[in-house]
Image (spheres, rainbow, N blue to C red):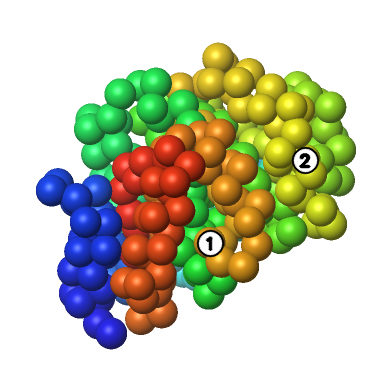
Amino acid sequence: MNAVRLQTELKEAFDAPEPPALSIISDSAPVPVLAPAPGEIDEILAAHGRLSVDAAARIKERAARLGEDFAIAARKLKLLTPADLAIARAIRDGVLQDAPSAFKLGAELVILHRPNSVASEQYRSLAARLLTMQSPERLKGISIIPAGAAVSADVAAANAAVAFAQLGKRVLLIDGDLRRPRLAKLFSAGPGAPERLADAASMEDALRETVVRGMSLLAGQAPTPRPEEFLASSRFSAMTAAARAEFDIVLALSAPFGPTAEGQFIWAETKSALVVARRDQTRADELRRLQSTLRQIGAEILGAALVA
């Protein structure tokens, strides 16, 4: 099944007069060269041990001699990686906090590591469309739902959360896929993050700021054996209620739609959903079953993302 056919089937499967916002996330196009200004960038990189004094001098000498900017000269000399340049620029521009963990963020965060890529633009576009098409109250609880066991939605959830934060929103990302928690590692969560999200007595116990300005994380670092017990509890309901009161955007990654049912507790709590489908894998009949389940629990689909 090609991408065009799946896009059509997504719209047909949701069976709405106005189909939900649809974004096809792809990172296959060439990435333009970043061109941050010299000076501040090399100081940030040097402070974090990513650039030696000798390497900085060589880059500046070439840039001055050939009329190149700092980034191009660094890449031509192979003295800096594109990822390091992107992170340093994000620190300079105030997108990331000036902290060592900024350079440990997962490479899957394309919106930070490759901000000019096609995929990054699509995540920003998806966030902008949801902000302009939905009420602020509805955005205070959105489930990110993988449309089947073959779909991984953690990367889509993480990049979407960063996109909202870059638009000036206070964002909370919840890793509700408790059997397979991955977001703490992706954001290089520091000491204090709970071993299991279910171990936290309240939102304050589990809440951790990320190095992304304006973005916080609720995520455990180890699997929870019986996640449905926590997700059905009053503690989880209290966490989501507190989150709505404190944040502009609350995104909750859930377990995939399929044989296990714990994701439904998150869907019922948030009442809104962003469905993530996989190119060449997700079938239209799966999407129809998911939509039927969401309708039964009173949750509404706000949009869909198609990932490779």
* Residue that protrudes farthest toward the top in the picture: 245
Q: Is residue 189 above or below residue 246?
A: below
> Label 1 vs label 2: CA separation?
18 Å
- Residues 153 and 268: in front is 268
In the rendered structure, the answer to whether residue 276 lies left or right of residue 153 reads left
Q: Position of residue 135 (x, y in %)?
A: 30, 24
The residue located at (41%, 63%) in the rendering is 289
The dot on residue 257 is: 1
- On-image quarter of the C terminus: bottom left
Q: Which residue is mark 2?
A: 230
Name which of mark 1 and mark 2 comes first in the sequence. 2
Q: Position of residue 44 (x, y in %)?
A: 58, 39
- On-image quarter of the N terminus: bottom left
Q: Is residue 175 above or below residue 206?
A: below
Label 2 amino acid?
Phe
Q: Position of residue 126 (x, y in %)?
A: 30, 46
Q: Is residue 120 above or below residue 142?
A: below
